[in-house]
Amino acid sequence: MKIFQMYEADIYRMAFVYMKNEQDALDIVQETAYKAFDKIETLKEPAYFKTWLVKIAISSSLNRLKQLQRIIPMQVDQLVELPTIKTDAALSLLLKQLINELTTEEKGIVLLKFYEDYTFKEIADTLQMPLGSVKSTLYRAHKKLRYQMEEVDFYG
Amino acid sequence: MDNIKDTVKSIPLPEGLHKRAKMGVAQVKKNRKNRWIYPAAASVFLASSISVGATMNEGINNLVSIVSPELAILLQPINRIAEDEGVKMEVIAAMQDEDMAVIYVTMQGIDGNPIDETLDVYDFSISKGRSFTNQTVHYDKETNTATVRFLSFGGDSANKLKLNIRTLLTNKEIFEDVAIPVDLTEIPQQQVVELPEDTIRGAGGPGGGIDTPNMVLAAGNLNIQTPYYDKMKITNVGIQDDRLYIQTEWTANDAIDHAQFFLVNAKGEKIKSTKGISYGRDETGAPVYNYNYEEIIFDVKDLNLADYQLQSKIYSYGDQVNGKWEATFKLNEMKGRSIPFTEDFAGWKAEKVIVSPLGLTILGKGAPNKLEDMTTTISMDDGTLIEMTSVVSHSENNHVKMKWTADKPLETEHIKVIYINGIEVNL
């Protein structure tokens, strides 16, 4: 349990970017903990525990989003419940862009690249996407996030 | 890059975060304890086969007898089989246009496994689409086979579909207005105690969710049951601080059966419970993480309990089968006729209409905020009018996709005019 505790904040924040509200993000944290410990014996290399959790959290978020759409045809904007952030306006604006303007695919890549510091190869492996698609999707996401960003190393 | 990291880190952490992670872990412990509930899967037989020739097999012949001739002619035979947990799934036939898919599947219980006319495909997914429904449209008692129709809406073009079924519920019964023989005039005052957080599966109701104190009676030894349903019994009742606590024990212990409780007076007026707490107790009555208890709480302030009776509405599923039934199959897409249609509606602007045998799709930009006022009617060459009676709308990233369907397929080559809110769209 302690090992999960080390990562629960990261899992929650990633889930929040996908789910856009606290309750659903907490559901994802619970589901990720459940799935991780339910299948813990299948994890052959403990060093990859966090990578494994991140993968479970992303896949759980995508499944949950699909389920939500199954229950009620919805408008994405109706679900946005941004938290009150007591930081500067630029961060707040960027968070809104991240949550509202990126597709789920773009969110996954941006989170893994910039929040989890994955290499493109690691992102491709985690999301089971071709390397080229990871780069092009990140480029697209980058264009959407209208803020001053340093040059991205697309060969990382 | 650092500002993205800072941005994500700025998302505040809620107080209940660690508790929810703990609940996930506790759930594993609980499920491991109860895996015996489901049919043992010592060696899962999972078969999958493809019929390349698309010959008319028995399944499609039977299906044709169930659906209308207009529909049958559009269906493409599939014949894909998957078998698990003593239930054989066969994808019999399917059809799709650009954004909607219809799949007919038979689920047959073999070796005495439970499939009946109340079959509810509880957990499933389809690779195409954003919203889904399913309905058991036919049941053949002789072969123990249910035919289920799946509908998928809001999808994008795909020449291959995947259907994935995980949980089946059968033997469903609903017991309404069931009187629970509790004498409400003699409810004792009792102390309540707060449940340990890690024993609570869930809590909800207007009286507060899991974050408000979850107070329950001590484990009781009453044995009050209704003759109509023997998997639930009242084990304790008590009053504390103007609240009536009803402690229920669920012997089915699978979290699928459930009930709503009411206090009902002679006029038939119903008072709903204000809170329900789902939790568990072990053999000694000590709270543990499980599904086998639910505490029902009513606010009874200013209420004369002598005027009321405790009643419930019980939802019972006799059998739950968890398994893996998957089929991937190629499916031709029926091409629709696309017609430009520019019109402003509440919150969105239509750009084009596509009409296919499955229905009418209106595509546009924006976010519809009022669907109930929209009407769509199709006038055919022979003067008949077809009213589109059902609509499913999706709006994402400012793109609107709205599917209208009628009670039968459309003969697109015989459509003369489409009326959308009275506006004429000529083909």
Image (cartoon, rainbow, N blue to C red):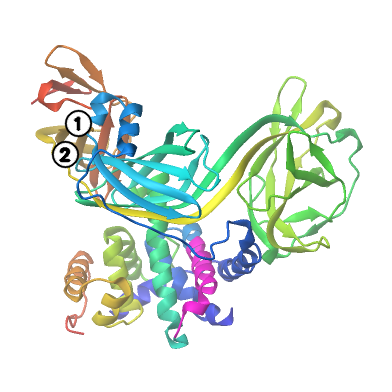
Dot 2: what SS? loop
Q: Position of residue B155 (x, y in %)?
A: 26, 47
Up-down relation of residue B153 to residue A12 (above or below): above
Contact check, label 1 and label 2, Cβ < 8 Å: yes
Q: Chain of mark 1?
A: B
Same-subunit check for callouts 1 and 2: yes
Position of the N terminus of chain B, as image quadrant, is bottom left
| B121 relative to B275 in the view: left or right | left
Query: Mark 2 belongs to which amino acid?
Result: Met
Q: Position of residue A149 (x, y in %)?
A: 22, 76
Magenta span of residues:
A26-44
First reached walking from the N terminus: tag 1 or tag 2: 2
Position of the C terminus of chain B, as image quadrant, is top left
Q: Position of residue B260 (x, y in %)?
A: 66, 38
| A36 relative to B363 in the view: left or right | right
Q: Residue at x 83, y 41 (%)?
A: B224
Disc on res. B357: 1
| Mark 1 → mark 2, Cα distance in angstroms | 8 Å
